[in-house]
Image (cartoon, helix red, strand yellow):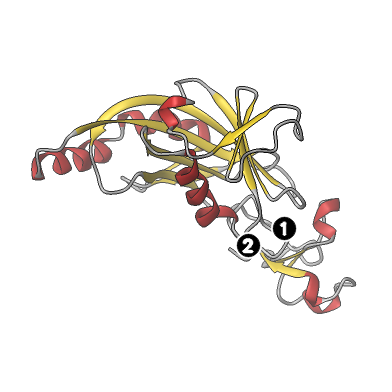
């Protein structure tokens, strides 16, 4: 799949921005300021710390999300959010790698990865700081790898959700390799060679068979394992 300029939608003002421009926009978005001010005026909320995270596909950076995450949230909660939003298909294992330490759901396999392994049941403010980057992987077979960066830390009003989406990429336009129409399916075998993107009209003639096809979805796990979005 060819690289292309990636744009996304702000969750507050619904404006469209590139990934890098979204980072700057979220700091000054007037609608975000208004929304958060209304929340504060409705109740005398407790102040909490939050992290602004940018999450993107390691090899497919056109898929990305800007997140606002409560600092007291655990890596396990962030893991579940990423699974539910982008990744989950067959209950595969997953892990974060932060500062040379792996954090997994079932920790205790020290040495297998050449580094210490700890539980994901650790708060983000114990392992994250502004400017820090780390990696995440889901499924150790057909692995989907993500990059995470802590853009900033801020004080905010307490809220019900531990994680909220600030902005997310719009679905990239991927064309059928046979006719040039928008692709709606991808071959889970051919994708490893950068091929297999097909529209509904061209799937019947694909040599691998329709049983190998998966839907084109807005996720860095598109075409992997049994992921359908």
How many marks the image carries: the answer is 2
Q: For mark 1, give the secondary structure.
A: loop
Q: Label 2 neighbourhood size at 10 Å, few (<14), some (14-19), many (20+)?
A: some
**Viewer-side residue, 91 vs 110:** 110
- Whether tag 1 and tag 2 are in contact, CB under 8 A, the answer is yes
> Residue 73 in the image: x percent, y percent?
39, 38
Name above or below for residue 217 compared with residue 114: below
Label for residue 89?
Answer: 2
Residue furthest out toward the right:
207
> Residue 195 in the image: x percent, y percent?
82, 56
Q: Quadrant of residue 191?
A: bottom right
User: At 88% across and 71% down in the image, what residue appears?
Assistant: 208
Q: For mark 2, give the secondary structure.
A: loop
Which callout, 1 or 2, points to the residue nearer the camera?
A: 2
> Residue 123 in the image: x percent, y percent?
42, 33
Report the side of 211 relative to 157 (left or right). Answer: right
User: At 80% across and 61% down in the image, what residue appears?
Assistant: 177
Name above or below for residue 154 compared with residue 192: above
**Viewer-side residue, 180 vs 220:** 220
> Residue 211 in the image: x percent, y percent?
79, 76
Visible residue check, residue 171: no
Disc 1 marks which residue? 224
> Of label 1 and label 2, which has the lower sequence position?
2
**Viewer-side residue, 171 vs 182:** 171
Residue furthest out toward the front:
108
User: At 43% across and 44% down in the image, what residue appears?
Assistant: 167
Name above or below for residue 213 compared with residue 128: below
Q: In which quarter of the image is the C terminus?
A: bottom right
Q: Quadrant of residue 204?
A: bottom right
Visible residue check, residue 77: yes
């Amino acid at each position: 799949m060819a690289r292309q300029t990636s744009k996304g939608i702000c969750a507050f003002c619904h404006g469209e921005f590139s990934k890098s421009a979204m980072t700057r926009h979220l700091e000054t978005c007037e609608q975000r300021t208004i929304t958060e001010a209304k929340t504060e005026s409705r109740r005398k909320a407790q102040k909490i710390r939050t992290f602004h995270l940018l999450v993107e596909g390691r090899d497919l950076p056109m898929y990305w999300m800007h997140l606002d995450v409560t600092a007291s949230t655990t890596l396990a909660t962030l893991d579940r959010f990423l699974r539910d939003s982008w990744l989950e298909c067959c209950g595969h294992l997953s892990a974060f790698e932060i500062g040379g330490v792996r954090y997994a759901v079932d920790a205790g396999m020290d040495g297998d990865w050449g580094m210490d392994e700890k539980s994901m049941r650790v708060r983000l403010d114990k392992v994250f700081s502004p400017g820090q980057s780390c990696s995440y992987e889901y499924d150790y077979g057909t692995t989907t790898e993500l990059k995470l960066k802590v853009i900033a830390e801020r004080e905010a009003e307490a809220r019900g959700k531990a994680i909220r989406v600030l902005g997310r990429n719009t679905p990239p336009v991927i064309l059928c390799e046979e006719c040039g129409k928008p692709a709606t399916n991808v071959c889970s075998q051919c994708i490893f060679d950068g091929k297999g993107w097909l529209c509904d009209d061209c799937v019947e003639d694909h040599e691998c068979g329709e049983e190998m096809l998966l839907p084109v979805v807005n996720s860095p796990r598109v075409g992997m394992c049994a992921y359908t979005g």
